[in-house]
Amino acid sequence: MQNLTDHITLRKLPKRILLTDSMRLADPRDAIRALPAESGVILRHYNVPDRAGLAREILTICRPKKIPLLIAGDAYLARTIGADGLHLPEDMLAHKLGHWRRWLRPNTFLCVAAHSPKALCKAASASASFALLSPVFKTKSHPESTFIGIHRFTNWTTNAQIPVYALGGVNYQNEGRVLTSGAVGWAAIDALSNKNNVLR
């Protein structure tokens, strides 16, 4: 990682990020309450009856803990509730990120999902705050999918012009490997929603 975007510093970035999932973590509230300090949350509950209501409730949990909350795929909702940022799946990068930033409040995070060096370059050139690069390791949810592996991940991250988080098969047991590879942190669903893991 050679350069960071001007509006973001490493000090402001969380060390780990919980991604919510409506199938694997139907009610994320207890997991968020149990998150350790310097964590973040990306709300990925897309098709729930009252997503705005859930987002507002989660924000009330996050604020006292100083946990940044990013909303996935909905810039209008992120702005409306005063969330800390927006997360975009890689397929939403078809729009220039400036398009999405216009919807956000100043000094909020814009995070993008990436699966290749090309996607990392595209995110960096558009001044995204950081990227989630995946899948780093083999995952339980997609065991047949090709994963990046720690050596390629290290190479891609080292050459990235943007802060990178490791996603996919990352947990407390292997976090040391990704943190010494140039990643600024890691993201997960199961590893950060399991009570035995978050209460550390």
Image (spheres, grey):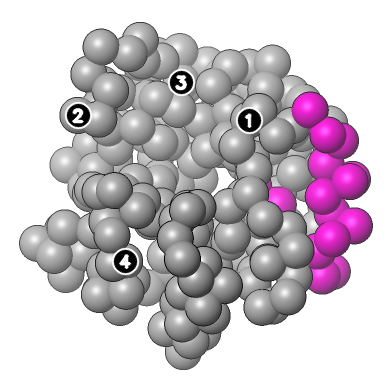
Q: Nearer the viewer, mark 3 or mark 2?
A: 2
The three-letter code of the residue at mark 3 reads Phe
How dense is the environment of label 4, judged by Cα within 10 Å: few (below 14), some, or many (20 and up)?
many
Q: Which mark is residue 28?
A: 4
Magenta segment boundaries in residue numbering: 94-111
Q: Which mark is residue 140?
A: 2
**Horizontal side, residue 113 vs residue 178: left or right:** right
Q: Position of residue 89 (x, y in %)?
A: 60, 37
Q: Which mark is residue 183?
A: none
How dense is the environment of label 3, judged by Cα within 10 Å: few (below 14), some, or many (20 and up)?
many
Question: Nearer the N terminus, badge 3 or badge 2?
Answer: 2
Question: Nearer the N terminus, badge 1 or badge 4?
Answer: 4
The three-letter code of the residue at mark 1 reads Glu
Q: Is residue 23 above or below residue 150?
A: below
- Which residue is nearer to you in this view: 29 or 135? 29
Question: Nearer the N terminus, badge 2 or badge 4?
Answer: 4
